[in-house]
Amino acid sequence: MPENLIFTRREIAFLRELGRNGVDFMVVGLASATLQGAPAVTQDIDLWFRDLSDPGIGKALDKVGGIYVPPIGGNPPMFAGQNVDLFDIVLRLDGIGPFRAEARDAIEVSLGSAKVMLLPLERIIASKKAANRPKDRASLPMLESALIAIRERRAKQQKP
């Protein structure tokens, strides 16, 4: 997998604190795809939590100077603060299983001092197909091509 190119020290610090506090989460969406080698560009980092009420999330936010903003009216929950402004909270992903089921096949990567779990590219593709939003449909050809290239690279590496 490529070296971390999309996370700053601030983002890594938050991810590290989530891990230190035992929070079960995954990086999903195009940030996850990029970390797996897809040539994607994204403006945010989508995080999917097993339990959004986990007190470890608040502890991690306190440590890095962020806050949790609960859902208000039609607005979803979010994080606020300079050190967490690129993170979006994902409440559900269409077309795939619940968090616990998907976490079994998550890919662990190191980002500096943080270890994070990534939703596998195959599952990102399945979710984007199910969501069927215009922006998801637009990213599918790139993601599917990246998946083919990654599989071919793995196959070459496994040959004696």
Image: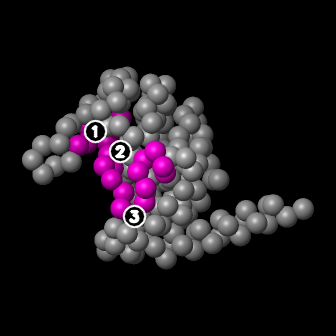
Three-letter amino acid code of the residue under disc 2: Phe
Q: Could you tell me which secondary element the residue under label 1 belongs to?
A: strand
129 shown above or below 61: below
Residue that numbered label 3 is attached to: 95
Q: Position of residue 137 (x, y in %)?
A: 38, 75
Q: On the image, which quarter does residue 149 sit in?
A: bottom right
Closer to us: mark 3 or mark 1? 3
Three-letter amino acid code of the residue under disc 1: Phe
Left or right of 89? Residue 119 is right
Q: Tell me the crowding category of disc 3: few under 14, some 14 to 19, or many 20 or more residues within 10 angstroms, Cα based.
A: some
Q: Is residue 64 visible?
A: no
Q: Which mark is residue 102?
A: none
Q: Which region of the structure is painted magenta?
A: 77-102
Residue that numbered label 2 is attached to: 87
Q: Are marks 2 and 3 in contact (CB under 8 Å)?
A: no
Q: CA distance from mark 2 to mark 3?
A: 22 Å
Q: Are marks 1 and 2 in contact (CB under 8 Å)?
A: yes
Q: Position of residue 73 (x, y in %)?
A: 9, 47
Residue at image coords 31%, 49%: 91
40 shown above or below 11: below
Q: Could you tell me which secondary element the residue under label 3 belongs to?
A: loop
Residues 78 and 7: in front is: 78
Left or right of 22? Residue 70 is left
Residue that numbered label 1 is attached to: 79
Residues 143 and 80: in front is: 143
Left or right of 68? Residue 2 is right
